[in-house]
Image: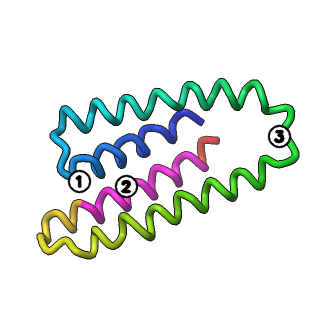
Amino acid sequence: MIIHEIPQELGDFGVLVYGGFSKAKALFYNFLSALTAFGGALLGYFISHTIEGFSHILLAFTAGGFLYIASADLVPEIHKETDAKRSGLSLAFFLFGIFLMFLLTKIA
């Protein structure tokens, strides 16, 4: 389950750099936001027995949130890009992310 963090953190880093952060600042803020995963893991561990019947609802809600962020914020920014090299790089990383998710389904 932790393996999904790698493409997520790479994507977050790319969004921050594209948004104007320096690489060092993007790495720092990405690290800070990743620290919240530990708190979420602990919280999930301690309340997992109480939400067992609702996990499918929470999963759908979370997936919907990620789809909304991708469709409402990220995709329009990609469409604004006029540099062919950057557009190609965005497409390559998008396809790489899909490939990584496919590999994760085969491993798990």
Q: Which residue has dot 1 on it?
A: 19
Residue at 30% across / 52% down in the picture?
15
Per the rendered image, the range of residues in magenta is 90-105
Residue 94: say if magenta.
Answer: yes
Amino acid type at circle 2 is Phe
From mark 1 to mark 2, how far is it between C-alphas? 21 Å
**Where residue 51 is drawn, which disc sits there?**
3
Q: Mark 2 or mark 3: name the one nearer the start of the chain.
A: 3
Type of the residue with mark 3: Ile
Q: Is residue 86 left or right of residue 42?
A: left
Would you identify the image quadrant in which residue 13 lies?
top left
Residue beneath the point at 23% across and 53% down: 19
Q: At label 1, which amino acid type do we have?
A: Gly
Query: Where is residue 69 drawn, in percent x and y?
Result: 46, 61
Element marked by disc 1: loop
60 is within the stretch colored magenta: no
Location of residue 2 with respect to 68 vertically, above or below: above
Say few, some or many: other residues with alpha carbon within 10 Å of mark 2 (under 14 / 14 to 19 / 20 or more). few
Element at badge 3? loop
User: Dot 2: what SS?
Assistant: helix
Picture residue at 76% right of the left edge, 24% below the top? 46
Foreground label between 1 and 2 = 1
State which tag comes first along the sequence, 3 or 1. 1
Residue at mark 3 to residue at mark 1: CA–CA distance: 36 Å
The x and y percentages for residue 9 are 39, 40
Gap in Å between the C-alphas at discs 2 and 3?
33 Å
User: Mark 2 — residue?
Assistant: 96
Marks 1 and 3: in contact by CB < 8 Å?
no
